[in-house]
Amino acid sequence: MPHDHHDDDFHHSGMSPSGHPYREDDDRPLTYWQTMEIAMRELLVEKGVLTPEEIARQIDEMDSREPANGAAVVARAWTDPDFKARLLKDASDASREMGFDIGPLRLIAIENTADTHNIIVCTLCSCYPRNLLGLPPDWYKSRAYRSRVVKEPRKVLAEFGVTLPENTTVRVHDSTADMRYIVLPRRPDGTDGWSADKLAELVTRDSMIGVGLAKSPV
């Protein structure tokens, strides 16, 4: 299945006067997808479909997204059983219910339990639920993570500081061009009666990718 390569290894660190992004390492040759992206930008500007300023604003909006949106979704699921059921049935609609526009993509929430732990990867590029989790971390886009987490997920988890019991099933989910995942981590013990806002502070980006756990209450 083709992937959405706008999420490929490309970081928008600045804008040129024409609206094209500067690359962090300009001595590296452009990849095929970077060349295609620049060509598409040039064409959109030339045809008057978009202006460089509109492109820059969209990139700024994308770069401003943070994992707080996803943390709010998780915290509500921890405190509202009906919402949790809706989230696990249709995470796209449940996210929109909270005012988070995830676009036309299908979002799937997968729940970590006492006997199952889930991890997200995009093996072909770096498809990622940016509207909820913000920009993907560099390691998520790396070839090492994308290949190793499929072959040796327990070893990768251990490198992130997560050691699971041998009887825990580890499942790796591969994102695609039209489908994204978010992990619903296990709620930490000792948080009974906590508000959703307080619980959201325990939800980490890595726990929603599956390479980490929610923070323990202090």
Image (cartoon, rainbow, N blue to C red):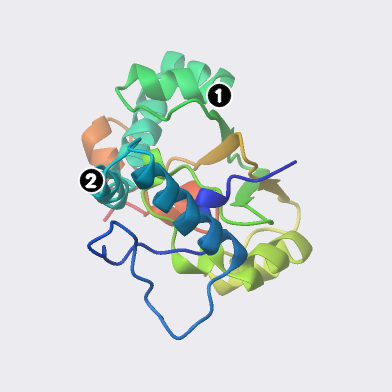
Q: Quadrant of the C terminus?
A: bottom left
- Residue at position x 71%, y 66% from top? 147
- Residue at position x 47%, y 51% from top? 207
- Left or right: residue 122 versus residue 200 is right
Number of marks in picture = 2
Q: Which mark is residue 110?
A: none
- Left or right: residue 132 versus residue 1 is left
| Element on which disc 2 rests | helix
- Asked if marks 2 and 1 touch (Cβ < 8 Å), the reply is no
How many residues crowd mark 1 within 10 Å: few (<14), some (14–19), many (20+)?
some
Residue 143, x across and y down, in percent: 64, 70
How many residues crowd mark 2 within 10 Å: few (<14), some (14–19), many (20+)?
few
Which one is closest to the eye, mark 2 or mark 1? 2
- Identify residue type, mark 1: Leu
- Residue at position x 75%, y 41% from top? 1
- Identify residue type, mark 2: Arg
- Left or right: residue 209 versus residue 216 is right
- Residue at position x 26%, y 62% from top? 15
| Element on which disc 1 rests | helix
The correct choice, above or below, for 208 with respect to 166 in the image is: above
The correct choice, above or below, for 194 with respect to 169 in the image is: above
For label 2, the residue is 57
For label 1, the residue is 88
Answer whether residue 27 is visible to the viewer in this image.
Answer: yes
Of the pair 210 and 55, the residue shown nearer to us: 55
The quadrant holding residue 89 is: top right
Spatial distance from mark 2 to mark 1, Cα to Cα?
A: 33 Å
